[in-house]
Structure formats: structure tokens, C-alpha cells
Amino acid sequence: MRTPWADGPEFVTQCPIRPGGTYTYRFKIENQEGTLWWHAHSRWLRATVYGALVIFPNSSSSYPFSAPKIDVPIILGEWWNRNILKVMRQALFTGAAPNVSNAYTVNGQPGDLYKCSSQGRHGDAKSNQRCTQPRALLQRGQPQTDGGRSRRRLQQALHHQRDHGRTGQTTNVLLTADQPPARYYMAARAYQSAQNAAFDNTTTTAILEYKTAAAANPILPRLPAFNDTATVTAFTSQLRVIRAQAKVPTQLDENLFFAFGLGLINCNPGPRCQGPNNTRFAASVNNVSFVLPRTVSLLQAYYQNIPGVYTTDFPPSPPRKFDYTGNVSRALWQPGSGTKMYKLKFGSNVQIVLQDTAIVTTEDHPIHLHGYHFFVVGQGFGNFNPATDTATFNLVDPPVRNTINVPVGGWAVIRFHADNPGVWLFHCHIDSHLTWGLAMAFIVGNGEGPSQTVEPPPADLPQC
Ligand SMILES: [Cu+2]
């Protein structure tokens, strides 16, 4: 996206849109195609305010595979019987983990495996969610994909397919409908890697139906166990870019090391101290728990030189080295806090080693970078070791993503060319983790000339 003013995260590139207000985003899409997920970026509204943005290939270019006959966006979501903002407020008041969701959804519908299917209503009476089953109709022999031009390709019959996508990730899947004409369930449930953490252990379904299928009960696939990290790893490690618009940077200008994970803040026992052993949950990157400004966005503060809103001393590596995925001393569980950004020169080649920590628990965090797609050049388990792990990097055809699910108790290494000026948030895509501080932001400076310079803000940008 060319203009950072249309990026959307509250207090990062704009003040939030007021309740009842409207705001129109205007932006130019450059060097992007495929299906992307758009969503609200204010408090936890992204839980239910979202949709698909399908960017078709330029008319002068072609698909890197036979052109699909149909595009079907499939969005996996979550459903809470309570107002999600009440769930958030309760968690932020008590300091404990938030209540888990009541259902998962495919395109907004939970599917046949929930009680509501027979009742026609979902959960409590206030919820008006109808429980019809989403369906995709298929003609035998016709391929289908969920997006424009895919950067990744999977050609598998859907009822054999085990796709793995974490919060915030999009995957374009090419399906060849060459199976016996029948009705097939597509099913999804959580992958949960954090130790002893509560999670929504339900399964959502939709039906893929061949046009010539007889009326019969759909066939339900067997899903991997909720904690089957081996299957997740087998799936993600086979992803490759089909045709990248840029080469993987090999000459690095920045080599950053971000250790991140949960933390616990000690507090006085009471209603606001309901985390484990009289604490409040926190999260951090390089021991900084990120705090959003409240009166102006970071991009406005940067563009208008407003002092006192942020600092640019975000640490390029952890201030203290430790055995990140080992038995971490309790003395290292409580992070500091701040609104710290890291400055990148326009055009620099950036590598970031993303290292999970075992503080509280290891977990697969989906880390999302705004403003860029990046190459995922390597990943593995345990602590990243530059002496041995660098040799395993894929610099030829690594997957291109904007969200990387860093392996639980492991690491991932990403690279990108910083050629999009502005302020860009880098954060975990689990809402509670972002709110607890698992975030930081980059300032990418201007290059030369108007095409490499942040545009002036729109006149109607929402005010705080
Ligand atoms: Cu996280």
C-alpha cells in the first residue's frame, strides 16, 4: 500500500473512527495481488469486523498457473456470545487471560457441529447468530482458488487437505475438483501450543458440494490434534514462493534480533491482580511492553514533529541475553514498558530474527508486519544459532507473507527491503497479546523525490 495514512491501526497511523462516525480510506495498491484480510484495528473489534479484499492480477499479466474458474473467499473467524468489548474490558480490568470464544466460524457461520444448528439460534437469547451452513458448489473437474494470483499453491483434494493458518494469516489455495462427486465438510479448529492455557476446543464446518452429488450426509475429515506441532511444521515448511516481485535481499543493512513472548507484572492482590500468582499478564518485544499513545497517532507525531509522544531507542537486540527457550529465571519475567520505535533508512535491507521465549509459556505467536510483505528465509525450534542456522536459510524461493507464525519455542527469520516510507506497526496478531504489549513500530524514512516520500495526511483524517 502506497500511503501509510490508510493503514488503519488506532494511535499508530490515525486516531480511531468515533462511534457513529464514518471515514473513507483512499489508497493506491502497488505490487500486490491475491486475497488479503481487511479488519478493524481498534481495540478488539477485529474479532468480528472483517472481510476479504481480493486484488486481481493486472490485466496485462497472467496467473502463474492455469487461471482458476471460480474464486471463493473463505474467512475463518471466532464468535463470542458476549460483546467482545466487554470481554476485553473484563480482561484488562482483572489482568487475567480473556474468556475464550464460544464458536469458530466459516464466513460468519459456525456450522453443523454446534447445538445451534438444531435450535436455529446460537447460545444465549441475545445472540442473533443464525446457524445455517455455508456451502460452496463445485463442478467436477473445475479448479478453484480462494484468491487472485496465488503466491503459494497447494493442489490437494479438499477432504485430504490439512491447511494450517494462524490468526491474521491468509493462504491462497488452489483446488482441483477431481474427487468422486459428493458432499464434503471443510472443517477447522484451533491449533493451541501454549501450555495449560484455556482455549475454544470446538470445530467449525462448511460444506463443499459437487453439483452432481447425491443428497447425503457430508463426509467429515479427520483433523489433527489441537497440539499437533509436527503436522503444522510439515505444512508450513513446504510453502514456497511461486513468483516473487523482488529478490531476497542478500546484502544486509540491518540485522535485528527480537526476543518476544508473555510476561507477568507483579501487583497487590485484589480484583485488578487476577493473573497467575498475584500478577497481571503482560507481553513484550526485547523486554519493552509497547504502549500506544492516547492523544495523537505515532505517524502524525512523526510527520508533524510533535515531541514527547515516542522515542526511537527501541533495542535492536535483547538488553540481556538468556536461554530464551530454556528455564527462564523469574527475575526476567517482568518487562519494562514504553512507546519505542526503531528507525530504518529508506531502501535498507532488513533481517529480523524472531525468537520465541519460554517466559510464562512458549507459544506460536503470529507476528504481523504492516506496510510490507517479507520473505521467511528460515525457521526452527529452540534458540536461534547464527553459526549453524544461517546455513539452512532458503534465499532462492522462500515463502512471502505479511504474518509469520513463529514456531512454538522456536524462531523464524524474515527479510524485507524497506522501501515503503512511514510508520509501520509490527505485532502479535492475537488481540490480547497486542494489548498486553507484544508490539513495536518501525519508522521508515523518506527516500528521494515524491514517490519515495510520505504523502500529506488526508484532510478528513479522524481526530482524537
Ligand atoms: Cu502472541
Image (cartoon, rainbow, N blue to C red):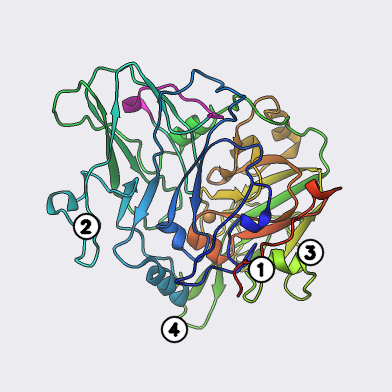
Q: Which residues are magenta?
A: 149-161
C-alpha distance separating marks 3 and 4: 35 Å
C-alpha distance separating marks 4 and 2: 35 Å
User: Is label 3 or label 4 in front?
Assistant: 3
Residue plotted at (46% across, 25% down)? 154
Instruction: Find residue 152 and name its label.
Output: none
Residue at label 4? 270
- Helix, strand or loop at mark 4: loop
- Helix, strand or loop at mark 2: loop
User: Is label 4 or label 2 in front?
Assistant: 2
Residue 166, image x, y percentages: 47, 45
Check if mark 4's residue and mark 1's residue have beta carbons within 8 Å.
no
Q: Would residue 325 be seen by someone viewing this image from the given angle? A: no
Instruction: State the quadrant of the C terminus.
Output: bottom right
Q: Earlier in the sequence, mark 4 or mark 1?
A: 4
Does 272 lie within the magenta span?
no
Is residue 434 shown left or right of residue 444? left
Going by the numbered disc 4, the residue's amino acid type is: Gly
Instruction: Find residue 122 and name its label.
Output: 2
Residue at label 3? 313
Label 4 residue near ligand 1, CB within 8 Å: no
Residue plotted at (80% across, 70% down)? 305
Crowd around label 2: few <14 · some 14–19 · many ≥20 (10 Å): many
- In depth, the one of 305 and 332 nearer the eye is 305
Is residue 382 shown left or right of residue 91? right
- Helix, strand or loop at mark 1: loop
Label 3 residue near ligand 1, CB within 8 Å: no
